[in-house]
Image (cartoon, rainbow, N blue to C red):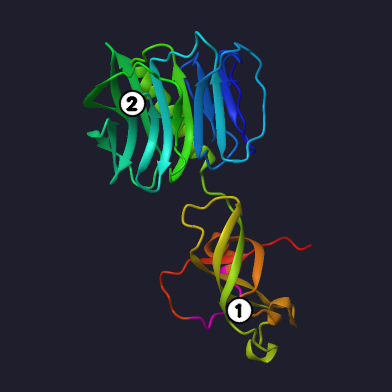
Amino acid sequence: MISFTLAASLVLYGFSQGNPAPGPHWPLVPDPLFAVNGIAHGEAGLQHVSVAVRNDGATVVKPAELKDPTSSEVTLPPGLSRWRTIEVMFTSAADGTLLSFGDLSVAVKQGRLWFARNGHMWDIAPLKADSLNDVQLVTHLDSYLAYVNGQRSAQTITVPAAIVPMQVGLDTWKGSVIGVCGYAKELSEDEVVANLHAGQAVAKAVYADTKTVTIEAELGAFTAVPELSQIAPYRSALVAEEYKILRISKGRMAALKEGMKVRIFRWGLKAGDKTDIAKIKTGDKATMVIQPLSADPKYEKEFQVDTLDGDISALYFVDVTPAP
């Protein structure tokens, strides 16, 4: 039985569901014991994945509900709980334990991946900063070979006698678990690379920048809406405002992060009339759809009023929220 739970969309591939549907997908190598994929529908990834053995031998795939909407549980029946290859795709924002089972842990520390066992640590390989990383542990002669982003590490470690329960992304993990899969067989180096490339391709498609992003933001500073006489002969003007992004609720742009400040141009005068932004005040919160100012030449050609400080590092956007 494989059971899973997640409020966001997940794709679960395994022995009870057959091969994935045609088209770009991960994992590419067929017949995994289990695979939890948090990227197939554009989700930001999981925080925590738990793999364990049940005693009832049930074989029904049954969605459930967890208190934590960023967690997933995978349950393997007796006789199918032994894997020889484990793959984890992840992003990391800080030091922490990525993977743990038996007396073995795989940890992130100072930008590198480490084996940890009984207080001892062994350096595996460097990680890519602020990016997707992939680690695959392949059992060979009772030792794990570690492949990090497709490159085999010289460091090996003995496979623990106990391999369940397995925890991926512990409670203190800072980052996302993008995908986890296990195989009953030892993957070849070519298969390791195939799964790596498949995961990168899916992640690239899912995490590609969207044309627009919907944000929830708080106003920090603004330019006063000018009088019509001040912009003559123009009758419309875009006015600059500074917002702190509280939340990105839809879409993605690699340059945008929650907590950062951005400069957003909004219509202050439209066809000679002042808009509602003439009434705004510092601390106001707003939800808006934005896109880079440079993405559409028509906005760059409009009359723009900007009395904010000349921060050359500021990112410039325009409010393109559809009219109600």
Residue at 37% across, 38% down = 97
Residue 235 visible (yes or no): no
Is 113 placed left or right of 178 in the picture? left
Kindly indicate the quadrant of the structure image that contains residue 74. top right
The residue positioned farthest toward the top in the image shown = 79
**Which residue is nearer to you in this view: 158 or 193?**
158
Disc 1 residue type? Thr
Q: Nearer the viewer, mark 2 or mark 1?
A: 2
The disc label shown at residue 282, or none: 1
Image quarter in which the C terminus is found:
bottom right
The residue positioned farthest toward the bottom in the image shown = 229
- The boundaries of the magenta stretch are 300-308
Kindly indicate the quadrant of the structure image that contains residue 92. top left
Residues at discs 2 and 1 in contact (Cβ within 8 Å):
no
Instruction: State the image coordinates of residue 277 (x, y, percent, origin top left).
Output: 69, 77
Asked whether residue 191 is drawn in magenta, I would say no
With respect to residue 266, does 131 lie above or below? above
Instruction: State the image coordinates of residue 135 (x, y, percent, origin top left).
Output: 36, 30
With respect to residue 297, does 230 lie above or below? below
Dot 1: within a 10 Å radius of its alpha carbon, few (fewer than 14), some, or many (20 or more) residues?
few
Q: Which structural element holds mark 2?
A: loop
Query: How far separated are the C-alphas under marks 2 and 1?
Result: 54 Å
Dot 2: within a 10 Å radius of its alpha carbon, few (fewer than 14), some, or many (20 or more) residues?
few
Disc 2 residue type? Asp
Identify the main secondary structure in magenta: loop
Residue at 44% across, 38% down = 170
Residue 228 visible (yes or no): yes
**Which residue is nearer to you in this view: 197 or 238?**
197
Q: Which residue is mark 2?
A: 103
Kindly indicate the quadrant of the structure image that contains residue 43. top right
Image quarter in which the N terminus is found:
top right
Tally the marks: 2
